[in-house]
Amino acid sequence: MLEWKEIEYEYDLLLKPSDLKRLKKLPWIDTIDQEISAYALSSSMYYKCDCKFWTYLNRNNIKVAESIAYMICGRYIRPAFRAAYALQYMEENVMVECFKKMEKTRNDNMIKRLIHSIQSLKIKEFVDKESGKYIPTDEAQKLLIDFKRWDII
């Protein structure tokens, strides 16, 4: 995680889906270091790999606030929407910390509306109505289908 942070979150250094799947199978996975767990969550958001599992595992991990904020405000829209959706499932202290980290980007109109939809717990509605401006409609529909699979946390 520290290496990823030091080089300004280079996406090439994220865990690959095969690594995430192996890590998930470890019998002691729920006791791993919080920073490693946050790093795995970021990787899962980027690659759309076991998002539900990593969100649930990190729901009260304050260390995820920075990486979720970075994903939401980052350069890739689909991981941003996934990270925003994951944030809805986090404990309140994690959400508050994440919002603090995103404060400086609130001047971006899309980010401002996305933050409002997170606070309202309405990411699905945001993706359904707004995503066509940012990604093709069929890609937005795929995200919504993914979110439905994720809903049983």
Image (cartoon, rainbow, N blue to C red):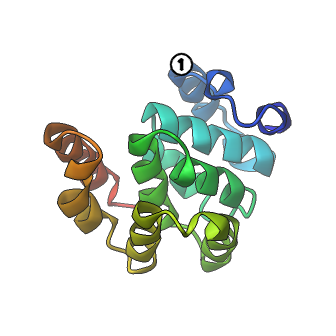
The residue depicted at 60 percent of the width and 79 percent of the height is 92
Left or right: 129 in relation to 101: left
Query: Residue 148: x, y in percent?
Result: 25, 54
> Under tag 1, what secondary structure?
helix
Q: Report the residue marked by disc 1.
A: 18
Quadrant hosting residue 10? top right
Quadrant hosting residue 63? bottom right
The residue depicted at 42 percent of the width and 66 percent of the height is 109
Q: Nearer the viewer, residue 5 or 111?
A: 111
The residue depicted at 46 percent of the width and 63 percent of the height is 111
Query: Residue 5: x, y in percent?
Result: 79, 39
Query: Residue 35: x, y in percent?
Result: 78, 47
State the quadrant of the C terminus. Answer: bottom left
Q: Is residue 34 above or below residue 98?
A: above
Left or right: 44 in relation to 7: left
Could you tell me if residue 32 is visible in this image? no
Label 1 Cα crowd, 10 Å radius (few <14 / some 14-19 / many 20+): few
Q: Is residue 62 above or below residue 57?
A: below
Query: Disc count in the image?
Result: 1
Give the amino acid at mark 1: Ser
Query: Residue 41: x, y in percent?
Result: 59, 44
Quadrant hosting residue 50? top left
Could you tell me if residue 55 is visible in this image? yes
The residue depicted at 60 percent of the width and 22 percent of the height is 19
Q: Is residue 50 above or below residue 133?
A: above
State the quadrant of the N terminus. Answer: top right
Q: Is residue 94 above or below residue 137?
A: below
Q: Nearer the viewer, residue 18 or 96?
A: 96
